[in-house]
Every structure is written in structure tokens, then in C-alpha cells.
Image (cartoon, rainbow, N blue to C red):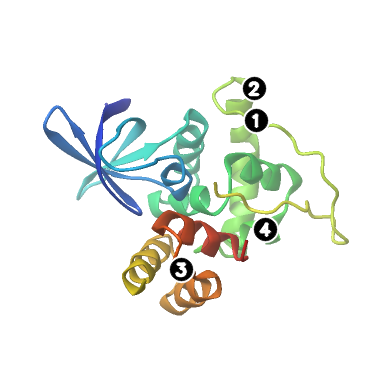
Amino acid sequence: MIGFLRGQLVHKRPPLLVLDVHGVGYEIEAPMSTFYQLEKVLEDVTILTHMHVREDAMLLFGFATESERVLFKTLLKVNGVGAKMALGILSAMSVNDFCAYIDSGDISALTRIPGVGKKTAERLQIEMRDRLKVVVESGLLSYEKPSVAVDTQGNLNIQPVAFANTIKHSAGEALISLGYKNIQAEKMIASVFDEDLSLEELIKRALQGVKL
């Protein structure tokens, strides 16, 4: 298996990265949390990877941190959670926030992730709680329990952290690839669009749902 790749970043268009490693171009799918940490193309970068083998394809996924990769691989063990949903989770919130929502049993926060309904959120909470405890205690995943207040329903008050027309279109395609419907993606982008924003920043603000 491929544990990591080090090479020149030659293409970045969420959720796809292309890395040139000694003349071989590797196509890598990555969550937005990883895109936020990559600067410009033609720079040398190191990407942690996970190869996902299906009956019809072999896919390579990339991550900026070991915690992201461990969470992704742990999510794939949950019944009904595929690679697309796992990428959506890592794009919608930080590893620490996801762990906090699971730890507190905040089902409503999990249902805000694209493609995650109430039943899936409940399954995530049940199946991930013990799994996360194992990887955290083993040191494979870094998690700091937040010291924040709870709201009137007892839920943690944590905000998800994410780290021209052509840009709108590209941002829309990225959100759709994460599981949002066309009309949802259009509204999210329209609410925060600024022509001076880069593609990654536009997607980031759309996921946050607020104008900064």
C-alpha cells in the first residue's frame, strides 16, 4: 500500500489533487480540510494517503494530517458510510469537532453533514464512540475535549471549522461532490460570494455558512 506521496502539486480542484512524483501523476481525492493547508500549485508537498480498493476501482485518498487519515479509515468501518460521506464529514468540520459531537451525542450537529440523515447520525454516534476511544487512547488520533458551554438542548455549542462565474461553477462542483444538492450548493455560494475570493476560500466560507 502507499503510505504517503511526496512530489510537486500540479493540479488542485476540489476534491481532486494531482501530484507529480518523479514524472508519474497521481490522482488523489482529498477533503477540504486538506485543500485549506495547500498553498499554490507547482510547490513540493507531502500527502498522507489511503488506498481504497473497490470491485470496480482503486482510489487514492490524501490527507494533510495523520488524524484526518485515521478518522477517514475509521469512518469507513461504519455500516453505511462510504468514502464520499467520509470526505464530506472531514470537509464539513474538523477532526476535533467531529470527535466532540460523537463524545457528547450531539445527533443534530451530525445531521448537518451532507448525506447524513438522523438514522445515519445515530449509527455514527453509536459505532464511532468506542472506535474513537481506541484510536485516541492509542495515540493515533489527536483529540482535545472542548471546554465550551452547552445550549438549551444540551448540545455542544461548537461551530464547524474548516480550516467570477467560473469560480462559482468550480465551487459548486466541489460542494456537489461532497453531497450537497445543486440548489443547496447554489444558495451556499451565493450567500458568501465575493469576486476577490480564491476558490478554496469561497468553498470554506460556503461551508461555514457565514460572511466573514
Disc 3 to disc 2: CB gap under 8 Å: no
Viewer-side label of 4, 1: 4
Mark 3 or mark 2, earlier in chain: 2
Check disc 3 and report its element: helix, strand or loop: loop
Residue 109, numbered label: 4
Check disc 1 and report its element: helix, strand or loop: helix
180 to the left or right of 166? right
**Looking at numbered disc 2 in the image, what kind of residue is underneath it?**
Glu
**Spatial CA span between label 3 and label 4:** 16 Å
Farthest residue, direction right: 152
**Spatial CA span between label 2 and label 1:** 6 Å
How far across and down, in percent of the image, does residue 84 sit? 40, 54
Residue 180, numbered label: 3
Q: How many marks?
A: 4
- Name which quarter of the figure residue 165 lies in: bottom left
| Residue assigned mark 1 | 133
Q: Residue at x 55, y 74 (%)?
A: 191
Viewer-side label of 3, 1: 3
